[in-house]
Amino acid sequence: MDIHAYMQKVGQQARAASRQMATVTTAKKNATLLAIADRINATRDELKLQNQEDLARGRANGLTDAMLDRLEFTDERLDQIIEGLKQVATLPDLIGEITDMSYRPSGIQVGKMRVPLGVIGMIYESRPNVTIEAASLCIKSGNAAILRGGSEAIASNHALAQCIRDALKSSGLNEHTVQVIETTDRACVGELITMDEYVDVIIPRGGKGLIERISKDARIPVIKHLDGICHVYIDDEADPKKAIDIAINSKTHRYGVCNAMETLLINDGVADIFLPVLADAFAEKGVELRGCEKTQQYIKCVAATQDDWSEEYLAPILSIKVVDSMEQAIKHINHYGSHHTDTLVSENYSKARLFMAAVDSSSVMINASTRFADGFEYGLGAEIGISTDKIHARGPVGLEGLTSQKYVVFGDGHIRT
Amino acid sequence: MDIHAYMQKVGQQARAASRQMATVTTAKKNATLLAIADRINATRDELKLQNQEDLARGRANGLTDAMLDRLEFTDERLDQIIEGLKQVATLPDLIGEITDMSYRPSGIQVGKMRVPLGVIGMIYESRPNVTIEAASLCIKSGNAAILRGGSEAIASNHALAQCIRDALKSSGLNEHTVQVIETTDRACVGELITMDEYVDVIIPRGGKGLIERISKDARIPVIKHLDGICHVYIDDEADPKKAIDIAINSKTHRYGVCNAMETLLINDGVADIFLPVLADAFAEKGVELRGCEKTQQYIKCVAATQDDWSEEYLAPILSIKVVDSMEQAIKHINHYGSHHTDTLVSENYSKARLFMAAVDSSSVMINASTRFADGFEYGLGAEIGISTDKIHARGPVGLEGLTSQKYVVFGDGHIRT
């Protein structure tokens, strides 16, 4: 197989499909999403059969139980996928929305119109449900998509691709609106991230290594999600109950997620009261604590090294640093954090205002758990990823992140003089 | 001089300054802009003296008269620069604006807050007034800036940098908020566009070659402005006067600008009436016409080659193509155009709606000259560039393009359950 020629064809087909998608009605896009749900429901047995092939190969290749679990289509998972499609169908259609329309002194009327980005390239690992999530969000936002899933899920992804294709055809849409790469050849990724003529944005979902590699080689803008080194700062004017609840929840609600707290910062004025209570609570949950020198004066814990401040544990480990002031906490967060999600616990109004403005993170919170940084919790209706970039989309990315705005100008024969 | 070490220091200073700028008050930012204006006014003689040095070197190096003209500080130009600073001071401050704040079912309150991008790297050629334009927009939007002007203008840029530095100091701001690179060594550009730790976005302004080189090598997002291959499509339901006025104005108002029309598309149903009138008008203005086969049946002109459809002339040359339908015109625009600015001339309501949705350009116009695609005409108050990208900023880029939005979350001790 000539990978270059194959990917060029995929790109051309995607571009052609994206041109057609730009003017497809909301009703037709929603009908297509429901048709995909119907196809998945009607072909459960076939989907599970193909999925078994992936699972068998995965077992033979020594995938861990956790990886095999993420790969598996149970009826419950298929129900969730179907439910997800129906939910995206109920979301408002952003495309065509015109805002800020105003008359200019010249007499022209200028506004901004929300439009699809064009062609979205997605690169992701293992979980095959991402195939349907990505397809549904791209269709709803009027984009074409090129999807490159993990080789572990190739048979499952092909079976899902068939459902999508059938649904696109049944609704009279271009069947190339969503294309799933047919080969596991890694050269496809290299082609995909450099076809700037045919692809408008790349969204990688996977480990940090994958995302860094893609960002480095891409010739196309990448919406990337690197680490989540999230902080909670407990101020000396913090409400004790809120402080304890938020610290415990931010760390222990789930460990392997990007919006979990990795470093706790605490004001020296309250460290002696709060730290022993927190140490007991974390010990009960089995969380290892690594503290700065001052922390070690208040509680028994492992000594934190310099590396701990920039480590995303994704595990029951927490680093703790005692600071003299909120200003010092903000400096620490902006320097060692990953600009993801950071919380202040304080009852002081002026500190809340300063923390909000000064912390350079995609989500800045006051008196709330970092775990709320999530597309569904924020009401985006769906999430295609979380961006740690500042450009284009920042934080949880929903449908709006898959769109752009163009200027529209209405005149009546107006010319510039 | 160790360029790497020098640029690292510049980057670190810029990052530190950007952290401070994030919480500077509107009043202080405006006062700084007015202080720069005062410094420029007070040091006119010194500025002109330094500028004479650049002009003398430019003459010795054989710069064209046009380039020398763009380089020169006349009193009128300095007045314009001062006026520009005062205008930016009167623009509303977007930073801190909170929108879309709403309560979620969990009880948290979520909204978006407009924040500076951080550190802007500008790379530009010859015209030294860009130094002040860029500095003023970056200060107003709460960003730090690293400015790398052309070597032809190095003495002028340094003199302006001194004015900026003095003003920053007099207002009590970090003097590194705006840094002008001190050396003409080209290695600085390579460093600047790869310091992703210290620079958040690169804005190049200059020829297509410069911008393509920078985009290729950058490790930081680039807001880029490539070519402007703009179209006017005259529909068979066009108002004759509007069609003629818009075609002539779009082409001949100014030739060397990105928003000038380069290709005229005209419906076959009206080509026999309009083309002879247009040919006379363009002949009078000295515009060379290059037509497709059909065009040549209606008027005397040079035969257009395939290359003409994707050529940005920036000169009194116009390619003309006769099409059978608006659909064919849209296909031509999306295929050969540069997604910059395209106009439909028609009185038909449904065609206007379709053209707006289907043309994939940063500005889509109905019955208006392409020459209106401009930050000032659109009411942005100022323009730092025009983006031909779809990501982040599209079309004319004003203050908003130098900002980002982060999520802010207000809770009252809320945790996820």
Image: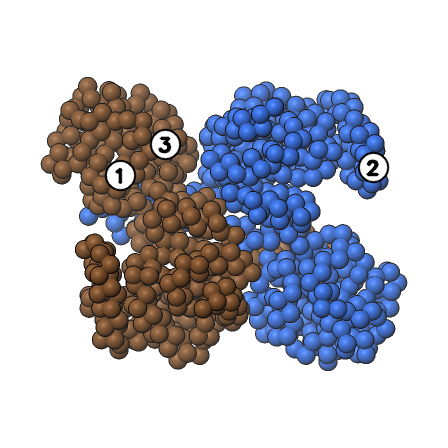
Chain colours: A blue, B brown
Q: Determine which residue is flagged by label 3.
A: B336
Q: Which chain carries label 3?
A: B
Q: In the image, is A224 to the left or to the right of B171?
A: right
**Circle 2 marks a residue in which chain?**
A
Q: What's the CA distance linking mark 2 and mark 1?
A: 60 Å
Q: Which residue is drawn at 42% across and 54% down?
A: B203
Question: What is the total number of numbered labels drawn onto the structure image?
Answer: 3
Decide: marks 2, 1 in contact (CB < 8 A)?
Answer: no
**Which residue is drawn at the image coordinates 30% and 45% (left, top)?**
B258
Task: Residue B90 in the image: state x and y as whole percent.
Answer: 34, 66
Quadrant (top left/top right/bottom left/bottom right) for the N terminus of chain A = top right
Q: For the point 62% across and 43% down, which residue is it? A: A204
Viewer-nearest of labels 2 and 3? Answer: 2
Q: Is mark 3 on a helix, strand or loop?
A: helix
Tag 3: amino acid:
Tyr
Q: Please report the residue visible at 70 percent of the width from the left and 25 percent of the height from the top.
A: A159
* In the foreground, B9 or A44: B9
- Do the residues marked 2 and 1 share a common chain? no
Residue A220 at what x, y percent from top left? 51, 42
Label 2 sits on what residue type? Gly
Which residue type does callout 1 highlight? Tyr
Q: How far apart are marks 2 and 3 (CA)?
A: 51 Å
- Labels 2 and 3 within one chain: no
Residue holding disc 2: A62
What chain letter is assigned to the residue under label 1?
B
Q: In this view, does A374 lie above or below A14?
A: below
Q: In this view, does A150 lie to the left or right of B205?
A: right
Which residue carries the number 1 mark?
Answer: B313
Rounded to the nearest whole Å, what is the CA distance between mark 3 and mark 1?
14 Å
